[in-house]
Image (cartoon, grey):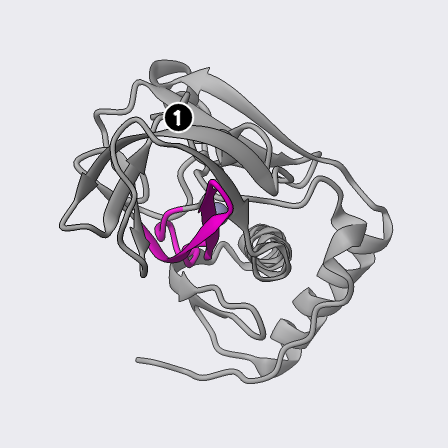
Amino acid sequence: MKDQALYMHDSYLKEFEAVVESVKDEKYVVLDKTAFYPKGGGQPNDTGTMIKDGQEFPVVFVGKFDNKISHEVSVPGLKAGDKVTGKIDWERRYRLMRMHTTAHLLSAVLHNKSGAMITGGDLDTEKSRIDFSLEDFDRGKLDEYCRLANEIIKNDLPVKVSFMKREEALKIPGMVKLAGALPPEIDEWRIVEIEGVDRQADGGTHVKSLKEIGQIEIIMVNKVS
Ligand SMILES: [Zn+2]
């Protein structure tokens, strides 16, 4: 899957050529390779279009099924063997990239300062939710962590993607921050690192430097006990 998933290697790939491997029920399309991100790991799926001979097939959902990336198109007509051009909705994706890197940065600051673990979350284009387990709930402290995260953004650190054998990755403390995020059968892990700040196993798409995030703002804090 790593080789099929172009977004794992290049998050900035907006357009690509691919061959249709299979089509199920006229609408579930598997390609030999794809830049479309499938919903998972807290990050929503990409949308966009597939184009064949000038005809557009809108991609309305992308998911992972049986270890394959499946694209749901809203127009029938694609067949196995077809050559298509895939175009992802870049505005949506780029917002999600910025959100995803923000989530890593904020959780790294929280984890370093308070020992908090991420328990879940929901990234979206306008605002995102991150769940933490905190010992004590203090809005003032959270604002301070947010301020610290914004300070780190100013340093404009690079965000790097690499691959590592599972056994090696497991030896590094803190590599898995979100429990159950990666299935154990994957023997090579993808590592996303905000240089000097955070390093974790992750399948999502990220910006390549922190300045692309912009400014982080906490809109709302809820205590769930
Ligand atoms: Zn992540």
Query: Number of labelled discs?
Result: 1
- Tell me if residue 63 comes above or below residue 61 in the rendering: above
Query: In the rendered image, which quarter is residue 167 located in?
Result: top left
Q: Residue under label 1, please give it.
A: 4
Can you name the residue that lies furthest to the left here? 25
- Tell me if residue 81 comes above or below residue 68 in the rendering: above
In magenta stretch: residue 103 = no
Q: Nearer the viewer, residue 151 or 61?
A: 61
**From where the camera sits, is residue 155 visible?**
yes
In magenta stretch: residue 60 = yes
Q: Nearer the viewer, residue 41 or 46?
A: 46
Q: Position of residue 49 (x, y in %)?
A: 47, 52
Picture residue at 76% right of the left edge, 53% below the top: 212
Which quarter of the rendering shows the C terminus?
bottom left
Query: In the rendered image, which quarter is residue 89 located in?
Result: bottom right
Q: Which residues are magenta?
A: 38-62
